[in-house]
Image (spheres, grey):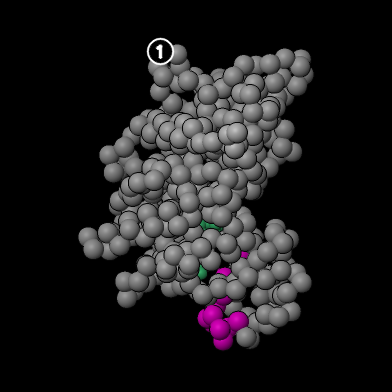
Amino acid sequence: MRKLKVAVVFGGRSAEHEVSLQSARNVIESLDRDRYEPVLIGIDKEGRWFLNESSIQLLNAGDPKMIRLTDGGHEIALMPNGSGSGLINLESNTRLGKIDVIFPVLHGPFGEDGTIQGLAKLANLPCVGAGILGSAVGMDKDVMKRLLHDAGIPIGKFVTLTAVTREKYPYDELVERLSPVLFVKPANLGSSVGISKVRDEKEYNKALDLALSYDLKVVVEEEIRGREIECAVLGNEDPRASIPGEVIPHTDFYSYEAKYIDENGAGLEIPAKLPVHVVKMVQETAINTFKALECLGMARVDVFLTEDERIIVNEINTIPGFTRISMYPKLWEFSGISHQELVDTLIQLALDDYSKRSRLKVSVEI
Ligand SMILES: Nc1ncnc2c1ncn2[C@@H]1O[C@H](COP(=O)(O)OP(=O)(O)O)[C@@H](O)[C@H]1O
Ligand SMILES: [Mg+2]
């Protein structure tokens, strides 16, 4: 059997560049070499694509703070021409041959938001994970919440504003409408970048400036007091949910530092200590969220569990962290699916979805 060429795409123009490198390393190591041939594509912070030699692809890969893309490699591009031409070497202007599937391991904008999914579609290639729509709505906290609300899935109170409309949302009014403590977030980002927990008007204004420096749209949310529970989802039309895990931040909230810089920033508990009926509720909510947002392949759904056992969806991550110690692969590992099986399943799901869509008519038959 011919091995499938899997283009693992990592790095990218995002605040989560370094995390992506660590996630990609784990995906690459988990690819079954009897069935798949990895093609490693590193995107630098300027957005240039490089074909990396497998042995040297990540510098200082063992150290999360030092990890970065290796210099060198050939600058390449993926041809968006629909005929499956695949990659082209921009230096020698030669074709590098076809690839069979794209595995984007890009967190945040320019990867998790539908952009690379769009490129894959133009290039007529299967792509692991959510498609353009699911990726874009999963990334946008404002649209995501509106769709969840529409589907009857519990979310916290929130408002959405821009630089133009911010005057209409004075601090006092929001405190009245939402809660005494507020969370201010750029609508489209991840890894807690640009997020503030706000306790007074001065902090509120500063938080808006900060969030508006990352995105044109900002969400302001009521504070939800509860445990942070995360659930992994895997599948296409009929997805399954993993055993939930819990994040226990040791800081004010689960900030960028707590996630990636401070080793003692947060504890992960797998499985989360929850009664069986709550586990069921979390799993159902995770699956309903996945479906409501039209996701495919994989996602991690993060919820709050309040003291009175209400579940409130915080967000979905369509390309969740995939490092060796990340929640998504760990939850599946605990649920009996190894990293290798997981990566294999994700690729098969992408191929299934692609072949289904390939059979659709694209024009009127005369
Ligand atoms: N409405 C909220 N109430 C309480 N804590 C929140 C709220 N929103 C966010 N947080 C805290 O901030 C963290 C990051 O927010 P989140 O919306 O998950 O952003 P990101 O997409 O960057 O991960 C959460 O894990 C949680 O600790
Ligand atoms: Mg989060």
* Front position in the image: 114 or 63: 114
Q: Quadrant of the N terminus?
A: top left
**Residue 336 visible in the displayed image:** yes
- Residue 70 in sight here: no
Residue 55 lies in quadrant = top right
Q: Nearer the viewer, residue 304 or 359?
A: 359
Residue marked by disc 1: 1
User: What residue type is disc 1 on?
Assistant: Met
Q: Residue at x 48, y 68 (%)?
A: 149
Q: Is residue 95 left or right of residue 351?
A: right
Residue at disc 1, CB closer than 8 Å to ligand 2: no
Q: What stretch is highlighted in magenta?
A: 174-185
Left or right of residue 202: residue 308: left
Q: Residue at x 53, y 50 (%)?
A: 134
- In the image, residue 353 above or below residue 99: below
Position of residue 24 relative to residue 307, above or below, is above
Left or right for 286, reference 166 = left
- Image quadrant holding the C terminus, namely top right
Q: From this view, report whether residue 360 is shown above or below residue 299.
A: above
Location of residue 70 in the rendering, given as x and y in whole percent from the top left corner: 65, 27
- Percent from the top left, x then y, of residue 326? 44, 44
Between 205 and 115, which is closer to the camera in this rendering?
115
Percent x, y of residue 45: 70, 39
Residue 167 vs 329, above or below: the answer is below
**x and y percent of residue 91 in the render?**
77, 19
Residue 180 colored in magenta in the image = yes
Specify the quadrant of the image occupied by residue 97.
top right
Residue 256 forms part of the magenta stretch: no
Q: Quadrant of residue 199?
A: bottom right
Q: Which residue is drawn at 58% across and 64% down?
A: 142
Residue at (66% x, 75% y) in the render: 204
Mark 1 residue crowding within 10 angstroms, few (<14) / some (14–19) / many (20+): few
